[in-house]
């Protein structure tokens, strides 16, 4: 017998080979060495997952889900093996149609709990929840910019994953605190604004040095970034609600039952429109219709955008101290402070230029 | 139409399917979780697919479905669940612990393991599926069923997948 090929070596290691092949390995030093090497590869592969412990909560979750599951009729059928030859087209079409019929009529209603809500209704309730509430909310979330929207929002953040810590006072529009952490965990930027104290602060890092710009005597607060982001999500949700081909899936997860609503990638209307949505996905909790995940891609202000949001934590009715809407300076920070000039869009640059002029004339 | 799940053993009604599923979770849950984790990475998705698989097993048993080789049955359902999740994930970039550099710098051994994981997850879906199934000790026949490929092709496809993984890991 000639020496073994790679497939036969693999089969020996996996104990799937014939007696004849095994006998050859016993007699052939070269093949024995190759089997030993492949066995080491497979051990390394197996060892990768061997140390993974099943999360203790998973067993409890499964037991709970099994206990709560309603009785059903009709066994779950697995996909058949691939046929060795080509099927006739009409057989395939009939089988597909029958399969879809079975899934729609018999199988789908048995996954999770049937919902009487449509995707549009779920989105509608979520929109209501998104804009409802009073008092201060503390929210932590991941924001992923894969295209231009951070610039459209006036932010200087690079594309990528950003962890955001946000305080947002619903009772006082414009009062907020937002901190953006880079993927390496460093505070990349922060913005606070408090119409009550007529102040706004911004923290930026330039060449590794932190600058804090404080604007006092603020007459007209800027629209807050949380409000801008919320407006963008609201607009995308509204478009999803109006789209005809949403898909709604009910999933039981660690956070309880959730609705997953997708709209498939569609044909863009072109880059001349103000707002267009080419694909979107929202994961919304069943109980309070909170949005846990959201992704949208399309065109905003004639620029492509791709934004993803994932909720990490949310607290409502948070008690805050007055200083929570200010940025505290640390040793080494350069703080520039000045009164608002009345032109909200140029306050920052005016204050910096005034400070520069003072330094030059000293 | 050919039955898609031809019984290998006579179906019998189980007195208490719920207890049976809990018992089967004890037998197969950990390896099914390891498989799903290999396919989907850390996070909730792997746990979700495991839970969904056992819920479908419950439905299967309640309906007196075929009880022959339930381990292969579970891996087939989980493999389909993983494939669905991966399709849905196309555009979402999840927050992964390995991307979070706020955690302490890993030692070199951990870096090697992380690297091998990363390579595994960067492989083509079918390569990753076959390697993940084999790592949990499934036979070629069971792998063929779970991966929806011909049994005669498993050895060849698996050997190639191992070669590709090994080449990228740099072993």
Image: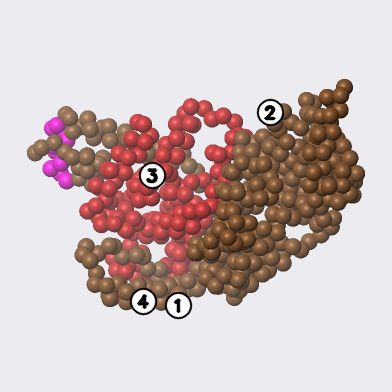
Q: What colour has chain A? A: brown
CA gap between label 3 and label 4 equals 34 Å
| Residue A107 vertical placement versus A66 (above, below) | below
Q: Which residues are magenta?
A: A18-28
Q: Is residue B125 visible?
A: yes
Q: Nearer the viewer, mark 2 or mark 1?
A: 2
Residue at image coords 48%, 31%: B111
Q: Is residue B129 left or right of residue A180?
A: left
Residue hosting label 2: A208
Q: Nearer the viewer, mark 2 or mark 3?
A: 2
CA gap between label 2 and label 1 equals 61 Å
Query: In which quarter of the view is residue A84 placed?
Result: bottom left
Q: Secondary structure at mark 4?
A: helix
CA gap between label 4 and label 2 equals 63 Å
Residue hosting label 3: B123
Q: Return the mark for residue A98.
A: 4
Residue hosting label 1: A105
Colour scheme in use:
by chain
Give the camera-side residue of B147 and B64. B147
Residue at image coords 27%, 43%: B159
| Residue A90 vertical placement versus A140 (above, below) | below
Q: Secondary structure at mark 1?
A: helix
Query: Mark 1 and mark 4, same subunit?
Result: yes
The answer to whether mark 4 and mark 2 are in CB contact below 8 A is no
Please state the chain letter of the residue tagged with numbered disc 4 in the rendered image: A
Q: Nearer the viewer, mark 4 or mark 2?
A: 2
The answer to whether mark 2 and mark 3 are in CB contact below 8 A is no
Q: Nearer the viewer, mark 3 or mark 4?
A: 3
How packed mark 4 is, by other alpha carbons closer than 10 Å (few <14, some 14-19, many 20 or more), is few
The answer to whether mark 2 and mark 1 are in CB contact below 8 A is no
CA gap between label 1 and label 4 equals 10 Å
């Amino acid at each position: 017998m000639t020496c073994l090929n790679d497939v036969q070596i693999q089969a020996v290691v996996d104990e799937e080979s014939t007696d004849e092949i095994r006998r050859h390995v016993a007699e052939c030093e070269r093949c024995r060495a190759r089997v030993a090497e492949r066995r080491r590869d497979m051990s390394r592969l197996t060892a990768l997952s061997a140390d993974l412990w099943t999360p203790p909560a998973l067993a409890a979750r499964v037991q709970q889900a099994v206990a709560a599951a309603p009785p059903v009729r009709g066994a779950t059928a697995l996909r058949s093996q691939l046929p060795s030859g080509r099927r006739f087209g009409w057989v395939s079409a009939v089988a597909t149609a029958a399969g879809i019929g079975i899934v729609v009529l018999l199988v789908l209603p048995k996954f999770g709990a049937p919902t009487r809500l449509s995707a549009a209704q779920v989105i509608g309730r979520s929109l209501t929840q998104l804009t409802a509430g009073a008092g201060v909310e503390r929210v932590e979330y991941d924001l992923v910019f894969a295209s231009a929207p951070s610039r459209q929002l006036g932010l200087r953040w690079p594309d990528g994953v950003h962890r955001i810590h946000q305080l947002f006072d619903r009772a006082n529009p414009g009062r907020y605190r937002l901190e953006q952490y880079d993927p390496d965990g460093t505070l990349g930027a922060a913005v606070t604004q408090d119409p009550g104290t007529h102040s706004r602060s911004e923290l930026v890092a330039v060449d590794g040095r932190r600058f804090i710009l404080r604007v006092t005597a603020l007459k007209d607060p800027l629209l807050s970034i949380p409000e801008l982001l919320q407006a963008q999500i609201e607009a995308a949700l509204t478009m999803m609600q109006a789209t005809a081909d949403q898909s709604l899936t009910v999933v039981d997860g660690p956070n309880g039952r959730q609705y997953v609503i997708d709209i498939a990638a569609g044909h863009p209307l072109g880059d001349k429109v103000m707002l267009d949505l080419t694909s979107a996905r929202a994961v919304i909790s069943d109980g309070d219709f909170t949005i846990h995940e959201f992704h949208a891609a399309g065109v905003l202000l004639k620029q492509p955008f791709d934004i993803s949001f994932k909720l990490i934590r949310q607290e409502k009715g948070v008690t805050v101290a007055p200083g929570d809407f200010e940025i505290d300076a640390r040793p080494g920070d350069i703080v520039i402070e000045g009164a608002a000039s009345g032109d909200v869009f140029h306050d920052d640059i005016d204050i910096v230029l005034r400070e520069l002029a003072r330094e030059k004339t000293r | 139409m050919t039955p898609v799940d031809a019984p290998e053993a006579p179906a019998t009604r189980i007195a208490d399917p719920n207890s049976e599923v809990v018992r089967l979770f004890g037998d197969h849950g950990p390896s099914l979780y390891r498989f799903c984790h290999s396919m989907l990475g850390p996070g909730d998705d792997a746990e979700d697919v495991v839970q969904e698989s056992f819920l479908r097993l419950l439905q299967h048993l309640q309906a007196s479905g075929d009880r022959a080789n339930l381990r292969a049955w579970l891996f087939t359902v989980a493999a389909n669940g993983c494939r669905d999740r991966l399709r849905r994930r196309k555009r979402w970039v999840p927050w992964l612990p390995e991307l979070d550099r706020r955690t302490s710098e890993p030692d070199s051994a951990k870096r090697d393991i992380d690297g091998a994981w990363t390579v595994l997850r960067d492989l083509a879906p079918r390569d990753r599926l076959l390697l993940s199934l084999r790592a949990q000790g499934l036979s070629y026949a069971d792998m063929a069923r779970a991966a929806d490929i011909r049994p005669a092709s498993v050895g060849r496809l698996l050997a190639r997948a191992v070669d590709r993984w090994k080449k990228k890991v740099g072993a």
